[in-house]
Amino acid sequence: MRTDSSPGSLPAREHLPAAGAGTPVLDVVVPVYNEEKDLGPCVRRLHEHLTRTFPYAFRITVADNASTDGTPRVAAGLAADLGTVRSVRLEQKGRGRALRTVWSASDAPVLAYMDVDLSTDLNALLPLVAPLISGHSDLAIGSRLARSSRVVRGAKREFISRTYNLILRGSLQARFSDAQCGFKAIRRDVAQVLLPLVEDTGWFFDTEMLVLAERAGCRIHEVPVDWVDDPDSTVHIVRTATEDLKGVWRVGKALATGSLPLDRLGRPFGDDPRDRELSGVPQGLARQLVGFCVVGALSTLFYLLLYSGFRHFTGSQLANALALLVSAVANTAANRRLTFGVRGRGGAVRHQAQGLVVFGIGLALTSGSLAALGAASADPDHSTELAVLIAANLAATVLRFLLFRAWVFPDAEPTAPAREPGLPEPGPRESRLPEPGPRQSPLPESRLPEPGPRQSPLPESRLPESQLPETHRPEPHLPDPYRAWSDATVRLQPVRHADTDHCRDAR
């Protein structure tokens, strides 16, 4: 799992500026491997559908994953016959590698991909990308598991798909419903931030991207789709499932250890510029309360177990002090990491010292409660002692949260992105993606900078290919750089009759 420096914060969600004539708004990538038989009919059908129904300029990019049959020849023929079709040849296999390569070099503000068999009904394509164009969402996926979806496939694939998504929900707390559907789209500005963090180059690529996007606070839009299984699919189910499970373990481990800089990818709250200019407004209070309550409940249980253990060897006051001291250290450490999102060793000693001061206040409350109980009863029951301590700890917990938030961790805002030193605060409508300066670049070297007019997306000043990670090395057979899209006004064409093709062409 990549643990390189933060690739930059996510930009504010805004409606995409309409592109000029001939500049694509949507780039649909079709990754293929040895598909010379199906490639031609499927791409022509997709091209015909987009020509009839899509109101913006578009491009179809065929990404050939080192095919050994006639697929490159068919792709080149399609690019020659259809002006909006491009062909890209990669010398290494891997769907994730193909998507990363094409998406990183594309100039279209919306990037999508679909499987070459077109199992998904194309009528879902415009609803898929519309929330990305409007700025409502960051990513969009087709879902075969929605209640209104209509799916035709065998029991074996149905069982594997649902089991896999249950694993994602149980292990990675994923909230999206269908990770494997080959029908997804992403905004380019979001892709530029997320792609450097995605390590997989195969079938787990889009699942990993979705998990990281969700953890980074991106909005994922789901579209119910009509889907018909391809009986001639060449996907090796067992091998793919094994690799996916390995990817789940790798991503889960990275998320658990905090090695990914997802806390630095926060975006501004809302789309209204006035929201971005507000200062001094506390954020993340609800999430902090939930985290603090969970940590507090576990700490209270830990404290009661320690008190009951120490009570067998010493008096109630000393047992209370020892149990509260040990649980307070653990409580401060847990709240520091889980509730207030503070990572690293910086300031840990100071936080523990301040936590001990808060512990002293809690000790005074609980010890005073025990002293009052002792004055009221010469020999109180153990259950009565526990009840008094629970009540005192509840009062101490409320006070502890207020002190933690206002004094111990006053600058810990989990929703605010960390900024690189020396970078100015963006204005209301500025992008949150920092621009590299003449002497330093806040973006990691594996990121491709956004292309400007008449500028190649791969600048001449980049590092030698031998020093780049393998998954980020540019492919030698990429087409000429695409033209950068501008903020011109698009001339919308009226949408024609909806596509009524509900099944694939007969093979």
Image (cartoon, rainbow, N blue to C red):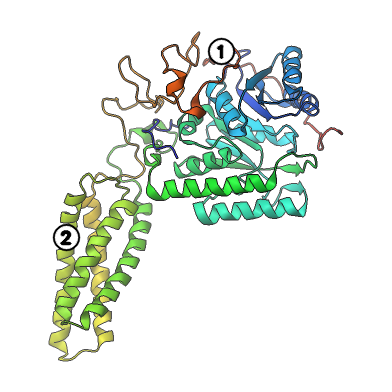
Image coordinates of residue 293 in percent, x first then y, are 35, 62
- Circles 1 and 2: CB distance less than 8 Å? no
In the image, residue 21 sits, relative to residue 30, either above or below, namely: above
Compared to 327, does 133 lie above or below?
Answer: above
Looking at the rendered structure, the kind of residue marked 2 is: Leu
Q: Is residue 233 left or right of residue 284?
A: right
Quadrant in which residue 96 is drawn? top right
Q: Earlier in the sequence, mark 1 or mark 2?
A: 2
Q: What type is the residue that disc 1 sits on?
A: Arg
Looking at the rendered image, the quarter that the C terminus falls into is top right
Q: In this view of the protein, can residue 57 be seen by the observer? A: no
* Image quadrant in which you'd find residue 477: top right
Image check: 86 left or right of 506?
left
Query: Which residue is drawn at the image coordinates 25% and 86% (left, top)?
Result: 382
For residue 271, above or below residue 455: below
Which residue in the protein does label 1 denote? Answer: 483
Q: Position of residue 65 (x, y in %)?
A: 65, 27
Q: Residues within 10 Å of mark 1 (few under 14, many from 20)?
A: some
Foreground pick, 271 / 352: 352
CA gap, disc 1 to disc 2?
60 Å
**To which quarter of the image does residue 119 belong?**
top right
Image quadrant holding the N terminus, namely top left
Residue 178 place in picture, x, y as percent: 62, 47
> What numbered label is drawn on residue 356?
2
Q: Is residue 23 left or right of residue 84?
A: left
Q: Dot 2, crowdedness within 10 Å: few (<14), some or many (≥20)?
A: some
Residue 437's tag is none
